[in-house]
Image (cartoon, grey):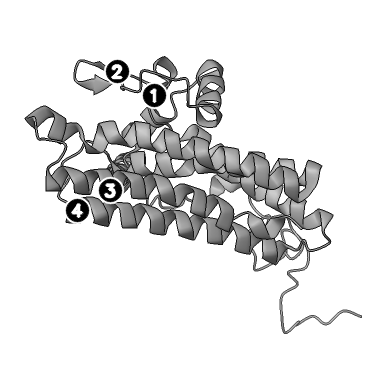
Amino acid sequence: MADPHPLFDDTSAAGGSGAPPGRGYGAPPPAASQYPPPASFLGEPVSSLAMAYGTSLASQGRDIVDRNIDRLVPVGRLKYYFAVDTVYVGRKLGLLVFPFMHQDWQVRYQQDAPVAPRFDVNAPDLYIPVMAFITYILVAGLALGTQNRFSPDSLGLQASSALAWLIVEVLAILLSLYLVTVNTDLTTIDLVAFSGYKYVGMIVGLVSGLLFGKTGYYMVLGWCCISIFVFMIRTLRLKILSEAAAEGVLVRGAKNQLRMYLTMAIAAVQPLFMYWLTYHLIR
């Protein structure tokens, strides 16, 4: 028999006593439309303002980065040194290996600015030095591999050593130009380009050594050393001696002799580096 006086109301069924209709135990929750809308902390005006502010900050940051990069690395100037084509590369490589028959070494100008390298074979570029440097590292790895001496550490040491010597060479040339008080239009990028041309002869010498042994290496490298010496003499003398020629200074002058000695020293150090960076790769 049921208790006529229950202590608690039965709320297990929908519509039970003491509970509102539809809210008994086990009943489904009310529809979402019955809840009040959540508070919007980022309304449409605030969201638009935040987006505009973020865009402004990103634009300012990009401008700051571009200015700093352009100050440290002149990107616009670098584009000039990579303005080459296939014809220029072929002619320049031939000039580096056979510079003896070339007559006109003067760089052409247009509106007080040198023309792009693809229009003038005498203009310096960075495409050939960069590609020659990478190719030299690969050929060095091949040479070490044929002698069972290859390892990632040795290849990395070869690359870092070649790059370090290139930096030391360019810094030494800049210091020498400063001490001799040479007013020239040569830039640091020009010196990197001229110093990087020797890797072409190094590659040719290494490939000859791999194919024909030490005899082929010494013969071909010797030819390339003479070629790069002649190339550097005929190219740099127009740059370093341009001030003396413009002012009509006598060739016998002491200052002009220092400039000539500096030109010859820069040209003479190229064969030394070519031999130093390749002789240990041929056995």
Q: Position of residue 82 (x, y in %)?
A: 44, 29
Which one is in front in this view, the residue at disc 1 or the one at disc 3? 3
Q: Position of residue 166 (x, y in %)?
A: 45, 53
Q: Amino acid at mark 4?
A: Tyr
Q: Which of 152 and 57 lies nearest the eye of the viewer?
A: 152
**Compared to 113, does 268 lie above or below?**
below
Q: Going from the N terminus, do you reach mark 3 or mark 2 first?
A: 2
**Tag of residue 87:** none
Q: Going from the N terminus, do you reach mark 1 or mark 4 first?
A: 1
Residue 267 left/right relative to 187: right
List the residue tagged with mark 2: 108
Q: Amino acid at mark 2?
A: Arg
Is disc 3 surrounded by few (<14), some (14 to 19) or many (20+) residues within 10 Å? Answer: few
Q: Going from the N terminus, do you reach mark 2 or mark 1 first?
A: 2
Task: Give the structural element (helix, strand or loop) at label 3.
Answer: helix
Q: Amino acid at mark 3?
A: Tyr
**Compared to 199, does 86 lie above or below?**
above
Q: Are marks 2 and 1 in contact (CB under 8 Å)?
A: yes
The N terminus - image quarter: bottom right
Task: Give the structural element (helix, strand or loop) at label 1.
Answer: loop
Q: CA distance from mark 3 to mark 4?
A: 14 Å
Q: Going from the N terminus, do you reach mark 1 or mark 3 first?
A: 1
List the residue tagged with mark 3: 261
Q: CA distance from mark 4 to mark 2?
A: 26 Å
From this viewpoint, which residue is outermost toward the right? 1
**Tag of residue 178:** 4
Q: Position of residue 258 (x, y in %)?
A: 21, 49
Is disc 1 surrounded by few (<14), some (14 to 19) or many (20+) residues within 10 Å? Answer: some
Q: CA distance from mark 1 to mark 3?
A: 22 Å
List the residue tagged with mark 1: 122
